[in-house]
Amino acid sequence: MGDDYTTTCGSHDGEEEQLSWTAPFSGNFTFDTAGSYSNTTVSLLNSACSGTLACMDNDPHEALAYTLTSGQTVTISVDGPSGDRYELSIYGEQCTDSVDNDGNGDTDCDDASCTGDPACPP
């Protein structure tokens, strides 16, 4: 693809990789590059790659959280230093199904991923 996409929150000299991903349910999703060999920048773009929905430069390590609807397709762009590999994990929490969707031990509104969800009162 080349190093031809500059994010709104940072960029690296390596070639970014972009992949298409569709939300399996409506909920809050976390896009995490923990375990990568170096600092990465993660951007979520609309499916046409014409607009940035969210972006994070994980230095220090952060994870990008974003709310998606069931069937919504986004493009995930991951950029890092030239030649470095990355690991991308995607976790989701549906805030109204009484299930621990992301496997962290918390369900629905008790899960930090659901903070700010309209189904969860402050």
Image (cartoon, helix red, strand yellow):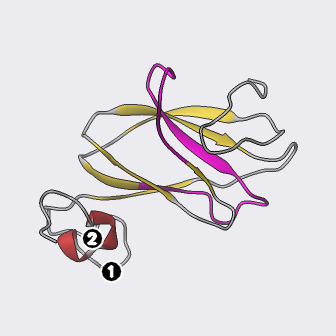
Q: Position of residue 119 (x, y in %)?
A: 12, 60
> Which of pointers 1 and 2 lies earlier in the amino acid sequence?
2
Residue type at numbered disc 2: Asp
Q: Image check: 111 left or right of 13?
A: left
Tell me, yes or no, whether the two marked residues, 1 and 2, touch with CB atoms within 8 Å.
Answer: yes
Question: In the depicted view, which residue is nearer to us: 11 or 3?
Answer: 11
Residue at 78% x, 50% y is: 85
* Residue 115 higher or lower than 110, as above or below: above
Q: Amino acid at mark 1?
A: Gly
Which disc, if any, is residue 95? none
Q: Quadrant of residue 105?
A: bottom left
In this rendering, position of residue 83 left or right of residue 33: right
Looking at the rendering, the stretch of residues picked out in magenta corresponds to: 30-55
Q: Nearer the viewer, residue 33 or 50?
A: 50
Identify whether 112 is placed above or below 58: below
Would you say 31 lies left or right of 88 here?
A: left
Tag 2 residue: 100
Q: Residue at x 78, y 60 (%)?
A: 37
Q: Would you identify the image quadrant in which residue 71 lies?
A: top left
Residue 11 occupies quadrant: top right
Q: Is residue 39 magenta?
A: yes
Quick check: 112 above or below 38? below
Q: Which residue is mark 1?
A: 105
Which element carries disc 2, helix, strand or loop? loop
Query: What residue is rendered at 68% in x and 28% in y?
Result: 5
Residue 58: percent from left, percent from top: 64, 59
Q: CA distance from mark 1 to mark 2?
A: 6 Å
Indicate the position of residue 50 as horizontal and vertical percent values: 50, 20
Quadrant that contains the C terminus:
bottom left
